[in-house]
Image (tube, grey):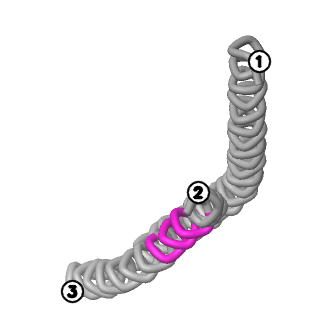
Amino acid sequence: MSEHDQSRKLADKSVAIANETLQKGKAAVDQSVQAFEQTYSAMIEQMRDYNLKMIDIAQANTAGVFEFARQLSTAKSSSDLFELWTAHAQKQTAMLNEQIKELTALGQKMAGESAEPITRSVSQAFKKAS
């Protein structure tokens, strides 16, 4: 085999390896894009749920304030006012604690579900690479 043929064979082999590497890279990029699209879609849905929860919380808090105002308007003595204030403060504290738990759980769910497609994509890319 002549030197020219050997050079040609080496060049063809190099081109084949480069094309294979390019195809693997393209597949990895396509997979990453798909994972980000899934993550984006999931985040949009989860943000909608989070916003609805915030609206529900605002509505509950507003209703609580109006109910408290109604109760205050019927108080006949300072001791009635004190009892109403104490009861309202306890009720609001309990409600706030529950709201914080709900929002925390929703936020954790959002974080976990949003990261899942990317984590899966990265794991698959490492499996293919090894």
Q: Position of residue 102 (x, y in %)?
A: 50, 77
Q: Which residue in the protein does label 1 denote? A: 8
Q: Earlier in the sequence, mark 2 or mark 3?
A: 3
Q: Which of marks 1 and 2 is nearer the N terminus?
A: 1
Indicate the quadrant containing the C terminus: top left, top right, bottom left or bottom right.
bottom right
Q: Which residue in the protein does label 3 denote? A: 79
Which segment is the magenta one? 104-113
| Amino acid residing under circle 3 | Ser
Q: Earlier in the sequence, mark 3 or mark 1?
A: 1
Q: Where is residue 123 in the image (x, y as percent from the top left)?
A: 57, 65
Q: Where is residue 32 in the image (x, y as percent from the top left)?
A: 68, 46
Q: Is mark 2 on a helix, strand or loop?
A: helix
| Amino acid residing under circle 2 | Ala
Q: Which residue is drawn at 34% across and 81% down?
A: 76
Q: Which residue lies furthest to the front in this view?
A: 1
Q: CA–CA distance between discs 2 and 3?
A: 74 Å
Residue 15, picture quadrant: top right
Q: Is 78 placed left or right of 119 in the picture?
A: left
Whether residue 17 is visible here, answered yes or no, is yes
**Which one is in front, 37 or 79?**
37
Q: What element carries label 3?
A: helix
- Report crowding for label 2: few under 14, some 14 to 19, many 20 or more residues within 10 A (C-alpha): few
Q: What element carries label 1?
A: helix
- Residue 17's label in the rendered image is none
Q: CA–CA distance between discs 3 and 1?
A: 100 Å
Q: Is 21 placed left or right of 68 in the picture?
A: right
- Residue 129's label in the rendered image is 2
